[in-house]
């Protein structure tokens, strides 16, 4: 039985499909004949003004009119019109929202194929969109939702998550940031001699950025996709065994307070241990600088973010990345202009406007336009062999009593407290994965 959210999404999809049949396909123009492009965007934490500035720059280049609808509940603004066959031409809205609008249009095959935008030159520039994008974002389930070569969702804004640490402490100690697991565990022994723990996590749920990257590091993108798609007995594979062995060893280096503070009330105490120089690394994201902005910090503290180590020096290093998307409805009346506008969103002019409000796009070299902690955090993408990793477990029908994320992440507490072994963990994960596989739509 589908849950209410999916049920509502399916209903919306049916209504959108029916209304689409009645659209007349005529493009919009102003009274003086200018094409009108209708843009809809979720108003996130970046504000409205940045979109107005970008639109003004686009209108300088093109003899067009762009009409913007922006709202913190943009789905409520545009869905009634879509049901009436009046679609926006460009939409900035990611997946994972309670309305499920983007997911609904994906299931309904209601998005325009944007693969050609990748090969198009950015308006006003001599490079293609593909040339400007950070490696590793295109071709994932987050951009190519049907698992083929076609791109329907373009990455708009992104944010890295990885291992957060105090760069100042490493400089004071003369320690190198580890890039391989051998180096990581050797550092753990060195730090232990000085009473410093190697690892902690705020709560076990923060291990998502760690685990997803480790799966890709050990088995590559193909193995990662198999895990996310619940391939049969994938958690009994050699790669999965290695992932759990590495994690179990890392957890043996956790700070003594990790499990006690890994709850909604005390998690900041685990985060504080990084600021106090009693722990070296924790999984976290760019928001940590603001969240702990007023917390006391050790002398010389400076935020650092790195991908998790790899098995072998020179291997690809994956950094888990959250992403907002821009897409074009297949019922858009100005598809070609919409695609040109999407390409313009990756121009240097647009990127500079967005960056002023910390709305960071997945463009190579973007870190140079940022300041403070953001420059440090986003420069992680400029390191050699680093690839962004997007996406997560595919959706299924609800399975009563089964939460594979809880099995994957929360069991870490039981491993540290020695209530479970890595073998128990692997068995539980495989059982959960098999149940989720059976519930795939």
Image (spheres, helix red, strand yellow):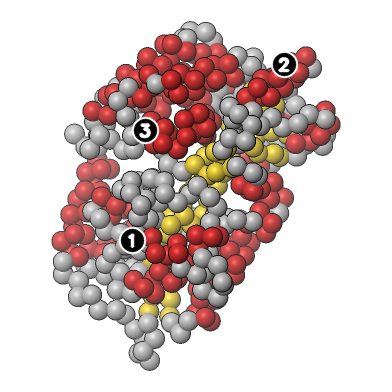
Closer to the chain start, of discs 2 and 1, is: 1
Closer to the chain start, of discs 1 and 3, is: 1
- The residue indicated by pointer 1 is 113
Q: Secondary structure at mark 1?
A: loop
Image point (36%, 24%), residue name = 234
Q: Secondary structure at mark 2?
A: helix
Q: Is residue 81 visible?
A: no
Closer to the chain start, of discs 2 and 3, is: 2
Classify the position of the C terminus by image quarter: top left
Determine whether label 1 and label 3 are within 8 Å by CB: no
Q: Badge 2 local density, few (<14 within 10 Å), some, or many (20+)?
A: some
Q: CA distance from mark 2 to mark 3?
A: 35 Å
Q: Is residue 66 visible?
A: yes
Q: Quadrant of residue 21?
A: bottom left
Image point (45%, 71%), residue name = 341
Image point (71%, 39%), residue name = 303
Residue 372: x %, y % from top left: 72, 50
- The residue indicated by pointer 2 is 189
Q: Is residue 17 left or right of residue 114?
A: left
Q: CA distance from mark 1 to mark 3?
A: 24 Å
Report the disc number at residue 313: none
- The residue indicated by pointer 3 is 226
Q: Is residue 398 left or right of residue 162?
A: left
């Amino acid at each position: 039985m589908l849950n209410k959210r999916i049920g509502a999404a399916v209903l919306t999809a049916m209504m959108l499909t029916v209304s689409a049949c009645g659209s007349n396909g005529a493009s919009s123009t102003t009274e003086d004949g200018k094409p009108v492009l209708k843009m809809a965007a979720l108003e996130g934490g970046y504000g409205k003004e940045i979109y107005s500035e970008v639109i003004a720059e686009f209108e300088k280049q093109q003899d067009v009119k762009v009409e913007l609808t922006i709202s913190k509940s943009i789905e409520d603004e545009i869905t009634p019109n879509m049901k009436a066959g009046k679609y926006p031409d460009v939409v900035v809205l990611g997946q994972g929202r309670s309305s499920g609008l983007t997911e609904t249009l994906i299931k309904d095959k209601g998005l325009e194929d944007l693969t050609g935008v990748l090969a198009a030159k950015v308006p006003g520039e001599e490079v293609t969109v593909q040339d400007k994008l950070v490696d590793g974002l295109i071709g994932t389930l987050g951009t190519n939702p049907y698992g083929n070569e076609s791109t329907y969702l373009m990455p708009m804004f992104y944010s890295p998550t990885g291992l957060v640490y105090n760069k100042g402490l490493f400089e004071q100690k003369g320690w190198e940031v580890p890039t391989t697991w051998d180096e990581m565990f050797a550092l753990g022994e060195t730090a232990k001699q000085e009473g410093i723990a190697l690892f902690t996590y705020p709560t076990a749920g923060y291990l998502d950025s760690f685990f997803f990257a480790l799966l890709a590091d050990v088995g590559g993108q193909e193995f990662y996709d198999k895990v996310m798609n619940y391939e049969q007995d994938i958690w009994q594979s050699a790669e999965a065994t290695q992932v759990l062995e590495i994690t179990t060893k890392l957890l043996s280096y956790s700070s003594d307070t990790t499990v006690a503070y890994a709850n909604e009330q005390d998690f900041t105490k685990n985060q504080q241990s990084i600021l106090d120089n009693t722990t070296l690394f924790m999984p976290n994201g760019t928001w940590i600088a603001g969240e702990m902005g007023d917390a006391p910090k050790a002398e010389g503290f400076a935020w650092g973010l790195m991908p998790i180590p790899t098995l072998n020096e020179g291997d690809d290093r994956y950094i888990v990345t959250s992403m907002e998307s821009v897409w074009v409805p297949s019922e858009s009346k100005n598809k070609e202009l919409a695609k040109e506008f999407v390409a313009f969103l990756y121009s240097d002019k647009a990127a500079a406007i967005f960056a002023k409000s910390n709305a960071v796009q997945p463009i190579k070299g973007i870190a140079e336009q940022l300041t403070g902690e953001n420059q440090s955090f986003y420069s992680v993408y400029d390191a050699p062999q680093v690839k962004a990793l997007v996406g997560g477990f595919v959706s299924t029908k609800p399975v009563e009593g089964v939460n594979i994320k809880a099995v994957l992440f929360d069991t870490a507490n039981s491993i540290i407290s020695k209530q479970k072994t890595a073998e128990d963990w692997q068995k539980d994960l495989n059982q959960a994965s098999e149940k989720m596989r059976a519930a795939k739509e």
